[in-house]
Image (spheres, helix red, strand yellow):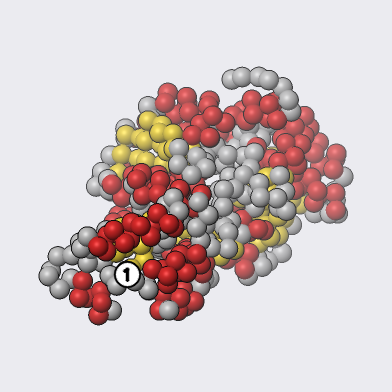
């Protein structure tokens, strides 16, 4: 294996136990084969278009634009996909790949439950067994999604170790994969983990920017000035950025979950507060203490509540191609309510982090500038939690 | 290296594993001495990690208890230096990449050599 394989600058790589190496090599070989296979791509495109509902809309948000009084704002509506988020793009790709590899069982980690629901959906459609690992804390925050996964025929296993959130769910899914690799594919939900996952997930999510680039050229005859997306592990962000990376004039802005603020310990803003480390199979930035112990991060958003960030984002930060800005719980909740009232679109609390930063940025830009915000998911799942955040005692 | 190789002189070796600082270093010291006195050929000392992805529930629990007890990589180096005064059984560390990477691999190896 060459030193550069799966590397993004110094980040990425394959830091995994021997027990996983065979499964990783098998996956890498299969992906290399199928990614350019016309039959595979035809089947995937058919699933994306006729099952998931792609292409997703690029919606011109006139009311928001007028209200903020600056740059023209477009929303890339990944919330309109089947299952309600961008996660289905990657899951259909990986599930199809797993099926071609002869696997009969999918396992996945989930934070907010969006990736778990997408995986359970693909498993139901393709006739595969499905087990989803979810932090026990998250099963409480996202009880509705737990029910949806079970309804779709998946088994949901609450993870009680560590902080009982997303990172612990990833650890548990990796443990499970080590134990059972012959019939099982680990359908990782973000652009993280050991190579080839960050590349596979990025390629399947790149459909977002492939579409938005063509859509904005069609609508405006030019590229946007800024593309904004929320970043946890970073799958919707890398998908939103990917086809603009060579276009130096397009600012790429990732919005990290700052929780209660980047000057507190209750934050998940990895690029802003973390440092380089090795965890979950990759080298990247992680929130950690001076001895390399991974920090118990916090965000109101279960989907962004992760102490690391995908290695390609770490690299885009290092070379200055993308910016990573912190957005607090308070700002995200304000944006969640703002977009609902202003455009009649209830965004996922994850996506609301991107909306919040756009609300700060747009007024500072001229009216002839263009911003695209990726709405990575819909916010139905968050309504009860946001109501509680505002002091209303409602239950699902 | 020769000490470690000689531990395998009989082809098979008895290698107990102990997580340092579970629940405190005094207990670890007792466990290491008991192992040494009862014929351990090599003693594997775990430096705990917050997210021991390769462990089952028992060692996961030991890692979490040890960190809750406040043990750190530096405290473990001091502890082993102290143990080495009377424990002659060869010892090796088992830990996770980020613990070594974060400490700086070269500095980590230098401390091991001490």
Left or right, A261 with respect to A299, comes to right
Percent x, y of residue A214: 62, 51
Quadrant into which the N terminus of chain A falls: bottom left
- At a point 32% along the width and 69% down the height, the residue shown is B87
- At a point 80% along the width and 51% down the height, the residue shown is A361
- At a point 35% along the width and 57% down the height, the residue shown is B30
Q: Quadrant of residue A389?
A: top right
- At a point 38% along the width and 57% down the height, the residue shown is B28
Can residue A367 be seen? Answer: yes
Left or right, A253 with respect to A110, comes to right
Tell how many labels.
1
Q: Residues within 10 Å of mark 1 (few under 14, many from 20)?
A: some
Quadrant into which the C terminus of chain A falls: top right
Residue most toward the left?
B10
Left or right, A325 with respect to B37, comes to right
Nearest to the observer: residue A125 or residue A300: A300
Q: Quadrant of residue B48?
A: bottom left
Nearest to the observer: residue A384 or residue A117: A384
Helix, strand or loop under label 1:
loop
Chain containing mark 1: B
Left or right, B114 with respect to A350, comes to left
Percent x, y of residue A5: 41, 69
Which residue is denoted by mark 1 in the rendering? Answer: B87
């Amino acid at each position: 294996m060459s030193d550069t394989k799966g590397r993004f600058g110094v980040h990425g790589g394959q830091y995994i136990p021997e027990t996983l190496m065979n499964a990783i090599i098998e996956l890498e070989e299969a992906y290399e084969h199928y990614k350019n296979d016309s039959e595979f791509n035809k089947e995937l495109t058919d699933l994306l278009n006729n099952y998931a509902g792609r292409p997703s809309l690029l919606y011109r948000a006139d009311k928001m634009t007028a209200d903020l009084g600056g740059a023209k704002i477009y929303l890339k509506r990944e919330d309109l996909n089947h299952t309600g988020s961008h996660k289905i793009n990657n899951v259909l790709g990986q599930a199809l790949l797993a099926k071609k590899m002869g696997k009969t069982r999918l396992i996945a980690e989930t934070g907010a439950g969006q990736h778990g629901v997408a995986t359970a959906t693909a498993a139901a459609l393709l006739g595969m067994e499905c087990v989803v690992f979810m932090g026990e804390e998250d099963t409480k925050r996202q009880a509705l999604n737990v029910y949806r996964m079970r309804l779709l025929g998946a088994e949901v296993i609450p993870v009680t170790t560590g902080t009982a959130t997303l990172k612990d769910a990833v650890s548990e899914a990796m443990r499970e994969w080590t134990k059972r690799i012959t019939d099982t594919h680990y359908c990782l939900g973000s652009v993280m983990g050991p190579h080839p996952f960050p590349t596979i997930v990025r390629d399947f999510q790149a459909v977002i920017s492939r579409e938005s680039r063509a859509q904005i050229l069609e609508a405006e005859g030019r590229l946007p000035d800024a593309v904004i997306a929320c970043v946890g592990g970073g799958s919707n962000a890398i998908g939103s950025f990917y086809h603009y990376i060579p276009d130096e004039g397009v600012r790429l802005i990732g919005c990290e979950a700052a929780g209660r603020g980047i000057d507190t310990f209750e934050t998940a803003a990895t690029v802003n507060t973390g440092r380089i480390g090795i965890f979950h199979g990759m080298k990247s930035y992680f929130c950690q203490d001076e001895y390399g112990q991974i920090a118990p991060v916090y965000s109101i958003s279960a989907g962004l509540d992760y102490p690391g960030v995908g290695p390609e984002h770490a690299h885009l930060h290092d070379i200055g191609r993308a910016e990573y800005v912190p957005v607090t719980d308070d700002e995200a909740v304000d944006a969640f309510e703002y977009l609902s009232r202003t455009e009649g679109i209830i965004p996922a609390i994850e996506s609301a982090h991107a909306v919040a930063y756009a609300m700060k940025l747009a007024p500072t830009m001229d009216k002839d500038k263009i911003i695209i915000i990726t709405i990575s998911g819909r916010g139905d799942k968050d309504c009860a939690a946001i109501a509680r955040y505002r002091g209303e005692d409602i239950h699902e | 290296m020769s000490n470690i190789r000689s531990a395998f002189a009989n082809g098979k070796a008895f290698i107990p594993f102990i997580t340092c600082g579970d629940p405190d270093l005094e207990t670890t010291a007792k466990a290491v001495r008991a192992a040494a006195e009862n014929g351990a050929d090599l003693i594997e000392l775990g430096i705990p990690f917050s997210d021991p992805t390769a462990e089952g529930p028992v060692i996961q629990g030991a890692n979490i208890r040890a960190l809750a007890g406040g043990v750190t990589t530096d405290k473990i180096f001091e502890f082993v230096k102290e143990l080495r005064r009377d424990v002659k059984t060869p010892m090796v560390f088992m830990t996770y990449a980020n613990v070594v990477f974060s400490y700086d691999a070269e500095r980590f190896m230098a401390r091991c050599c001490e």
